[in-house]
């Protein structure tokens, strides 16, 4: 269980990338989003209740919700839908399908920017992305830690599609863990994510 979400009074679903750990909030890049769409709230509640009761019930896919296990196709589809820009932040880079989609986007002319905290675990994957034309920015240990898991496709101050969720780019996260994210075109979410990722990219070190 790696999902991070809270349902309040059967009215609002808060989901995101942050763990409920006090120390994280001053030192990590994370995002939370409020979702008051009734079917999303209902679906999240039903899945929580099933998990709480240890029932083997598939999560309800409603609205823009993206559940794991099984979220790879939704994230790849979002990447494939981009026509001009992609902004990406993630803690991990260890999934062939995601990496291939990012590579294909760069090769078809999309400006792809990936921001991560440096780790030798991802050196090979990032080098391959860079060779394909992806712009990579790495933050050091003394900078804010990228714990976020977001994709911003064709995002401008007025439009775009953003994914915010708990899914890391790894096989375990996408195919085995319970994770939850959401796809939204909310201009508030798009602007907030786009601004933060661009700012993080600017202070990182370019390269693979």
Image (tube, rainbow, N blue to C red):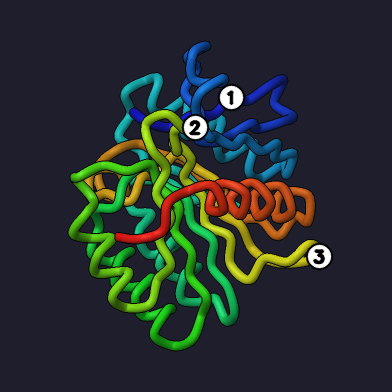
- Nearest to N terminus: mark 2 or mark 1: 1
Residue 126 is situated, as x and y percent measured from the top left of the image, at 28, 60
Please tell me the numbered disc located at residue 65. none
**Residue ID for mark 3:** 158
Few, some or many residues within 10 Å of mark 3 (<14, 14–19, 20+): few
Q: Residue furthest bottom?
A: 108
Residue 98 is situated, as x and y percent measured from the top left of the image, at 33, 64
Label 2: element kind: loop
> Is residue 111 in sight in this rendering?
yes
Q: Is residue 142 above or below residue 119?
A: above
Please tell me the numbered disc located at residue 144. 2
Instruction: Tell us which disc is closer to us: 3 or 1.
Output: 3
Q: Quadrant of residue 16?
A: top right
Q: Nearer the viewer, residue 160 or 13?
A: 160
Few, some or many residues within 10 Å of mark 2 (<14, 14–19, 20+): some
Instruction: Tell us which disc is closer to us: 2 or 1.
Output: 2
Q: Work out how far the residue at label 3 is from the one at label 1, CA to CA, in angstroms.
A: 28 Å
Label 3: element kind: loop
**Residue ID for mark 1:** 6
| In the image: residue 158, left or right of residue 200 | right
């Amino acid at each position: 269980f790696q999902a991070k979400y809270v349902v309040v009074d059967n009215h609002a679903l808060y989901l995101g990338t942050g763990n409920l750990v006090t120390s994280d909030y001053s030192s990590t890049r994370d995002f939370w989003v409020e979702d008051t769409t009734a079917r999303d709230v209902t679906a999240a509640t039903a899945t929580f209740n099933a998990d709480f009761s240890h029932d083997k019930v598939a999560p309800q896919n409603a609205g823009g919700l993206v559940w794991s296990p099984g979220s790879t196709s939704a994230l790849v589809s979002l990447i494939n839908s981009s026509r001009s820009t992609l902004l990406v932040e993630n803690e991990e880079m260890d999934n062939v399908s995601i990496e291939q989609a990012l590579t294909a986007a760069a090769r078809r002319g999309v400006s792809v920017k990936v921001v991560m905290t440096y780790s030798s675990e991802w050196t090979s994957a990032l080098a391959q992305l860079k060779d394909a034309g992806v712009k990579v920015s790495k933050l050091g240990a003394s900078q804010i830690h990228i714990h976020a898991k977001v994709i911003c496709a064709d995002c401008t101050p007025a439009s775009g599609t953003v994914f915010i969720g708990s899914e890391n780019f790894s096989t375990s996260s996408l195919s085995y863990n319970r994770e939850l994210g959401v796809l939204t075109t909310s201009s508030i979410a798009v602007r907030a994510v786009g601004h933060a990722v661009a700012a993080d990219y600017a202070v990182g070190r370019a390269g693979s």
